[in-house]
Each structure stands twice: as C-alpha cells, then as structure tokens.
Amino acid sequence: MLQALAGEVLTRPPLWLMRQAGRYLPEYRALRNKAASFLEFCYTPDLAMEATLQPLQRFGMDGAILFSDILVIPDALGQKVDFREGEGPILQPIRKAADIKTLKKNSVLDHLRPVFDTIKRLSLEMPPGVTLIGFAGAPWTVAVYMVEGRGGTDCGTVRAWARKSPDGFAALIDLLIEATADYLAEQVRNGVEVIQVFDSWAGVLDDDEFRRWVIEPTRRLVRRLKTTCPGAPVIGFPRGAGKRAEAYVAATAVAGISLDHTQPLDWIAGTLQPKCTVQGNLDNQVLLAGGSALERRTREILEALTGGPFIFNLGHGVLPETPPEHVARLVEIVHGWPAAVAERPVR
Ligand code: CP3
C-alpha cells in the first residue's frame, strides 16, 4: 500500500475493503456481544484490536483499518452520541452558534487515549507487508451527523444553517479541523502508517458548497498533517463527488483518492490516475450479489486501473448481509492478478 501511495505501479495491486470488519462476519457479531455499547466496544483495546485483526485472519487483506468510528470525535467533544441497534447513530443535535460553545475541545486526545492504545498494540501485531490504516471523518461529514443528529437524511438542516450563516457554521468546521488534525497526528505517532479521511456526505453539496465545506477544510487538514506527520500519506474519500474529484485532488494534495462505484473507469484512469494514486471502486452491491457479476466487474476494474498507481477497494463499505465467501473470492481474484490470459473476459 505504501508503495502504491508513493506512486508506484504494481503488477498486483494491494487490497483492503472499507468496513472489512463488521456485522457480515459471525466472529465480529460474537465479539460485539462482549461490550454493552458500540462506543464501549471502540474504547476497549482488547476488543477493538481483535475486531481489526479478524478480517486479516480470515481473508489476508493487505491493509488493516483500525476498528473505531468517525463519531468518536463528537463523543470526545462532549456531544451525546448513542448507537442504537437497527437505527444507526443518534446524536443530541447542535443547531446554532451557542451550541458550538458547549463543546469541549481541550479533552479530545485524553478521551481518545484507548484508541491510541489500540493502535500502539496493533502496530506490534501487523503481519509483514500489511499496512495499518488510521482514519477520521472529514469535517463536513462529521458536522452532518452533529447537526442532523443522525445519518440517512437529505442534510437539509445542516445545509440551511451553512447557507443562512456561513460564518457561524464555519466555527464548527474550524473546530473539527483542529480536533481531527490533532487526533490523526496522534494516531500516526502511535503507529498508523496511512490515513483515510471519510467524507461520506460530500455528494449532497452543490459546487460552491463542495468547494467551501469539502475541499477547503480537507485542504487545511491535509496541510496540517503534512507538517505534523509528513511520513503518513492521506487518502481522501469524497463519496459522491463525481467529476469534482479532480478539483479535490488538485486542491487538497492528497496522496490517494478513494472513488465510489458511480465514477467511470476510463475517466478515473485517464484523468485522475496520472495525478494521484486511485483506490476503489467495486460496487458493494456487486460484492453482495457475488457470482459471475463479481468475477466480471472485478476483472474490469483490474484491467482498467492496474496500469497506474492503484489500491483495490470497494466504492463504499461492505454491506452487513454480504456472504463472507464473496469476500474470500474477491481477495482470491485480486491476489491472483494478473490472471492467466485465458481467464480474462473476451472483448
Ligand atoms: O472495518 C472498518 O471499516 C473499521 C471500522 C469502521 C466503522 N465505521 C465501524 C462500525 C469505520 C472505518 C467506520 C466509518 C464510518 N462510521 C463512516 C464512514 C464510512 C461510511 O460508511 O460512509 C460513517 C458515516 C460512520 C457512522 C456510522 N457508524 C453509521 C452510520 C453506523 C450505523 C450504520 C452501520 O453501518 O452499521 C455506524 C456503526 C458502525 N460503525 C458499526 C461498525 C462495525 C456497526 C455497529 C455495531 O456493530 O453495532
């Protein structure tokens, strides 16, 4: 992964999957029952470490993503965050300037100490050649959850606030840039080698909003990380960015860009890959379906993107209903690349 992120073109690309740990694995569900709440699970190094390693033990990916969540930042800032079974995260929403003042920015790193302990222990356990990936939510996406109070909305409340009083909303984004930069730098100090910044809700924004609330905060975050931890490459994931991924790469100077399944392979190879390492972009629905669709699409992606610096991944996280055998087959195809010529689809 580190070679790919340094711009090297590899015959067989490295592979990891967003949400490679989680409910589609029976061993994860068994482990999850040992903690009273999801956040407690994230803050218990024994459990978080085990959950991080489970997909590696079963499938042998080339990267291990720290088991945690993007919403540990609002939790560390003192916002009430609750994960409910079947409902996803619920937060006590922040809706105005006065609410921002209630957030406690000074205790973030202390609160997240168990996450750093998990990383420190994991970094000693990584098999040779396997990269330890740290992560955080991008300021915009974390702000969406903080303001909406939940995911799965049209982001109308947060967009209305940002439109009505951009300077007031910017105070929240600025605070998140600071907290996230400190959090990620501390992850690197404790042993993560690569950072992924998840901007899962980037796609709801118009072009002006995208520049101001996705590109600009990410640019500032990446710039800070380049001074505090220059050795750790950053992968940005502005999900739903479409063609705006090009402006995102140019302005933020990320080492890698993670692409979703809607972005065309010829455009990725022709426009993005000459400038940046690309990661992606198998549709998680195709992984769920398995069979010939999985075989065909995986090979199409490999053919289109192995000519430049590339990391194989999904376009978004593994879905909870995904059969683990489909993941095993995907890893087998990618690890077996380049396949014998006869196995390639005839075009
Ligand atoms: O394997 C991994 O990818 C590592 C762990 C990881 C989790 N969440 C574990 C998790 C990572 C990298 C995340 C990131 C995350 N969390 C994102 C960005 C990526 C994306 O999917 O867009 C977002 C938006 C969240 C917020 C979040 N956390 C939601 C919306 C939910 C509920 C819906 C769901 O997918 O379950 C969570 C809970 C969560 N985070 C679970 C896991 C394994 C399931 C909770 C449980 O096991 O009880």
Image: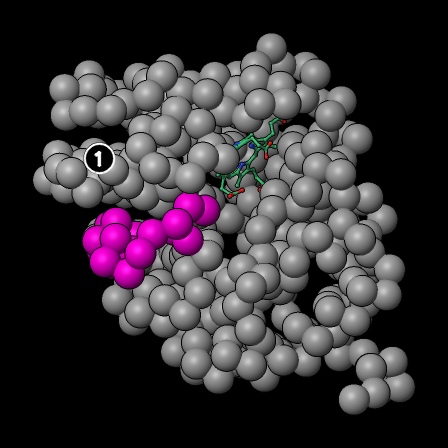
Main secondary-structure element of the magenta-colored stretch: helix
The residue under label 1 is which amino acid type? Trp
* Image coordinates for residue 136, horizontal then vertical, percent: 41, 41
Above or below: residue 13 compared with residue 340: above
Q: Quadrant of residue 23?
A: top right
Q: Ligand 1 sits in which quadrant?
A: top right
Q: What residue is at 70 percent from the left and 52 percent from the top?
A: 285
> Is residue 115 or residue 303 the one in the foreground?
303
> Is residue 247 or residue 233 the one in the foreground?
247
Q: Is residue 175 left or right of residue 339?
A: left
Q: Range of the magenta residues?
A: 200-219
Q: Is residue 74 left or right of residue 257?
A: left
* Residue picked out by circle 1: 161
328 inside magenta stretch:
no
Q: Is residue 106 left or right of residue 144?
A: left
* Image coordinates for residue 60, horizontal then vertical, percent: 73, 52
* Image coordinates for residue 122, horizontal then vertical, percent: 56, 38
Above or below: residue 335 compared with residue 83: below
Q: What residue is at 14 percent from the left and 42 percent from the top?
A: 166
